[in-house]
Amino acid sequence: MAHWIYGPSYLSCETALAYYGLIPERVEATISMTPKRDAQFETPVGRFIYHHIKTAQYIPGITQVELYPNRHVLMATPEKALVDMINRLPPLHTLEAVQSWLHDALRIEPESIVKLSKTRFVAIAQAYSKQSNVALLHRYRETLK
């Protein structure tokens, strides 16, 4: 439904992380990324938040998910959802700050981070090129066994 309200867009950030079971909290709004301007809509079915993303960063890491029978949506992979979130933060500067953000702020278990695809992280991180938070997240993932 989110892509019908304001598109093109794909579900991401906390919405995608909750769908994949990576964060324990319930998400109060449906969060999407769009190459258009930031937007927010209150509807009878809920609150929809759209964050701007550069066009070059839009495609890598999007997948089609069947939420209900014959109801498909575009959604970020878990790796892309994390990248979309960390890219919006102020600079973190250290691997310890990334670890704290993942484990303390988001409450993502280290074992869950280990299961994320290194290959997808590389492909997604390349689209974000020199953005330090994304590079730090990728480096942090590489330190985990």
Image: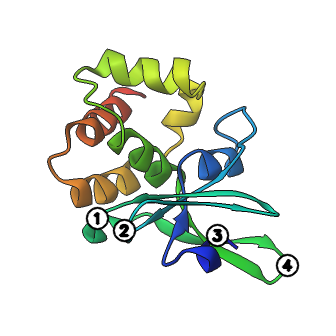
Residue 104 occupies quadrant: top right
SS under mark 3: helix
Q: Which mark is residue 54?
A: 1
Q: Do the residues under discs 1 and 4 have CB atoms within 8 angstroms?
A: no
SS under mark 1: loop
Which one is in front, 95 or 25? 25
Q: Do the residues under discs 2 and 1 have CB atoms within 8 angstroms?
A: yes
Amino acid under label 2? Tyr
**Of discs 3 and 2, which sits in the foreground?**
3
**Of discs 4 and 2, which sits in the foreground?**
2
Structural distance between the alpha carbons of marks 3 and 4? 17 Å
Which residue in the protein does label 2 denote?
58
Which residue in the protein does label 4 denote?
69
Instruction: Bin the neighbour count of mark 4 within 10 Å (Cα to Cα): few under 14, some 14-19, many 20 and up.
Output: few
Horizontal and vertical percent position of residue 66: 73, 73
Structural distance between the alpha carbons of marks 1 and 4? 32 Å
Residue 24 occupies quadrant: top right
Labels 3 and 4: the sequence-earlier one: 3
Amino acid under label 1? Lys
Of all residues shown, which one is farthest toward the right?
Answer: 69
Q: Which mark is residue 62?
A: none
Amino acid under label 4? Pro
Residue 41 occupies quadrant: bottom right
